Structures are given as structure tokens and as C-alpha cells.
Image (tube, rainbow, N blue to C red):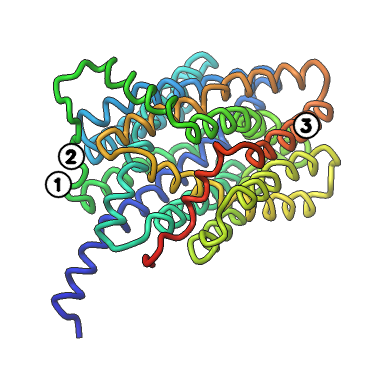
Amino acid sequence: MITADTARENRSRTPLIGLLAAELISKAGNAITMVAVPLYVLGTTGSALATGVAGVFATVPVVVGGALGGAVIDRFGYRTSSILADLASGVTVLLIPVFALTSGLPFWLLLLLVFLSGLLDTPGDTAKTVLLPELAERSGTAIARAAGAQSAVQRSASMIGASTAGILVALAGATNSLLVNAATFAVSAVLIAVCIPRSVALPLRQDGDAPYLRELADGIRFLLKQPLLRNVVLLVMVTNAIDIAGVTVIKPIFATAHSDSGSLLGFMIGCFGAGALAGSALFALWGHRLAGRAFFVWSFFFAGVPPYLAMFLDLPIAGVLVVFALSGLSAGAINPMLSTAMYALTPVPMRARIFGATTAGVAAAMPLGSFVAGLAIAGVGFAPTVLFCAVLYAVLTVIPLFGSRWKGLDAARAEPGIG
């Protein structure tokens, strides 16, 4: 028998579940794009440098959208911003296969559409991220556990989307697979519109008439004044540059050398996503009780270094997929730890601006990573480039062991008395 109290409890959980479902669907679609675009460029140009250039156009909008989108979200509210961003991104993604199937898709037009899609999508992702704390509070869920669930959803999306992309690319071609991505954006927008009440996360600006650039500067200044946030941004900025080089250039080249049409790329990313899903789920259940600097460094090291070593050593495909899955398992705890620490440090009225500035900061070197990877492979070869990535990643990930400014990572431990 369902009591009135139970009904109220279920209603309070609906927005959180709706948010996580929308993220699952939209990010699964993004994973399809992550696989399809570099494979399309490699297939049509055969150039590592051109693939790197495409990666630049996919990542520059993350920087721009992160920096400028936070203040926009604060003006219009998280719910409205998420819906509009999903719809606009869906249209731009849809145009890629439409042009490819009709009048043709020259390289410059592909770059333009990829740029616009990323520019519109980034503020939507930020809006979904900053919705989480209020929805978690409404559902009575600890922030650390909600962040772990959100990370698990994002990892699930990567696994599902990338694996689906591997199949779609093999069966229908790279550009046609983007039709599915366009549909995922539409479904995500509908879920947010239906499940998230209009009263949730309305514009929270305390200075309603403040100029836009002042709001943007406020978020950046706050970020710079927080030692932990500043250090996180600097560290993740460099590791993200390596990661995006892997996703947009290194892994596609490895996949095309070991599989027809490069469909192996989808399964590489899917195995990593499956491992990360398991890691996020374990963190949400009990790993948050172990969170801290040492656990963070352990997770970061084994998430980043082994995949590059596996490609450098040219392990058998089965071995590569196992390494990617185990690395994903280590990666599952990273985002929940960082998100929980950030939620604890950021004031609610500035949350979108600060998260937007953080997104821009951690993505700042990503365009350079894609371009340099393409240039390096064209210049010195695949193996030296991959080995350098592994060594640099290893050095970077041990940095949080030193200095008191990283102690804030302990905020990711379970809140006393909750959950």
C-alpha cells in the first residue's frame, strides 16, 4: 500500500531521476559524436593532422561555452538553459548527416557544425551539473552519493554511446550514426522539461542588474582565490589535453590500424566507460568513505597511464580492451571526488558561473592537445607520441600528494549522518 508520505517521497525523487536520465541520454549521444567525427575525418582525409584540426574545432567551443555560458545560465535559470542548449545542439548535429546525404559535407562545413554543436552543448552540460545539489537535497540524498550517481550515469552514457557508435559506424557509416545523436538531444530536452519543476533553480543572481562581463569576472575571481579549485583546474587542464589527444587523434588512429572502418574505437571507449561505470557505482556505495588525496592519486594514475602504455606496446586487442576496462574502473571515482569538493566550496548563487569558469579552465589546453597530437604523429610517429603521453600523465598525477592545498579533496568523504 502506497501512503501519502511515500507518494511525496517519490515525487521528491522524480526531478533527480529525470536529470540523471536526461544526462544519460544526451551524453550517450555525445559519445557517438566522439567516435563518429574523428573516424569520418580519418576515413575521408587519411591525415592525422586533419584529425587533430577537427579535434581543435570540437574542443575550442568547450572553452568558450564554459567561460561565457555560466553567466548566461545564471540569467535564464538552469532548467531553461538546459532545454534550449539541448534543442540547439540537436539541430546542429542533425545538419551534419543532412548535408552529407544531400549537397555534400566539405571539411570546412563539418568543422563549423562541430564547433557550433560544442558551443551550444557546453552551457547545457553546465546547467545539468549545477542542478544536482538542489535536486539531491530534495530527494534526501547525500551530495557525495548523488555526485557518484551522476558520474555513474555519465560513465554509463560513454559506455552505451561509444559501443553503439562502433556498431552504427560499421553498419551505417560515421555520419549516419549522428542521426541518433540528434534524437538523443531532443529526448533529453523533453525529460528536463517534464521532470524538473519550473520552481527549481530559477535565476539566483543576487545582483540582478550586474553587467554580463562583471558576472563572468566574478566567477573567475572566485575560482582563482580558492587554492584547491585553482590547483584542480591547472592539473586537469593538462591531463585533459592528453585525454583529448587520445580521444580525437591517438585512439582513432590505433583503432583504424586494427579494425575495419575503425569501429574498434567505439569498443575501446565503451570498455573504458563500462569500467568507469563500475567504479562510479562502487564509489557511490562505499568508496566515498575512502576518498582523499592518496585515493585520488591512485585513481588518477591508473585511469590515465595504462591505456597509453597498452597502445604503445601494441598489445593484442583483447588485452587492450581489458586494460581500458580496468583503467575505467579507476577513473570512476575521480569526478565524484572533484564534484563533491567543488559543491562544498562554491556559493549557490554563483554556482553556474564558477562551474562554467572551471569548465573553461580545465578545457583550455584541449584544442592544443588535439593539434599537437596530430602534428607529433605526423612528425615523429605514433609510438613516441603515445609513450610521451604516458610518461607525462604519470608525472602529473602524483602532484596532489604534495602540498597542503590539496587537502580539500577530503571533502568527498561521506557526510556524517547522511545516507
User: In this rendering, is residue 304 above or below 55?
Assistant: below
Q: Residue furthest bottom?
A: 1
User: In this rendering, is residue 234 above or below 156?
Assistant: above
Task: Report which quarter residue 376 is drawn in.
Answer: top right
In this rendered view, identify the residue nearer to me: 71 or 45.
71
User: In this rendering, is residue 124 above or below 327?
Assistant: above
The residue beneath circle 1 is 199
How far separated are the C-alphas under marks 2 and 1? 6 Å
Looking at the image, is mark 3 or mark 2 nearer the viewer?
2
Q: Is residue 95 visible?
A: no
The residue beneath circle 3 is 386
Q: Tag 1, which secondary structure?
A: loop
Q: Point out the image quarter for the N terminus.
A: bottom left
The circle on residue 378 is none
Type of the residue with mark 2: Leu
Type of the residue with mark 3: Val
Return the x and y of residue 36 as percentages of the image width and height: 56, 35
Return the x and y of residue 418 as percentages of the image width and height: 37, 65
Left or right of 15, for residue 202: left
Quick one: label 3 or label 2, which is nearer the N terminus?
Answer: 2
Q: Residue at x 56, y 47 (%)?
A: 334
Left or right of 335, for residue 73: left
Q: Residue at x 23, y 53 (%)?
A: 195
The residue beneath circle 2 is 202
Left or right of 152, for residue 416: left
| Mark 3 Cα-neighbour bin, 10 Å: few <14, some 14–19, many ≥20 | many
Q: Residue at x 70, y 23 (%)?
A: 373
Q: Are marks 2 and 1 in contact (CB under 8 Å)?
A: yes
How far separated are the C-alphas under marks 3 and 1? 49 Å
Q: Point out the image quarter for the C terminus.
A: bottom left
In this rendered view, identify the residue nearer to me: 230 or 208.
230
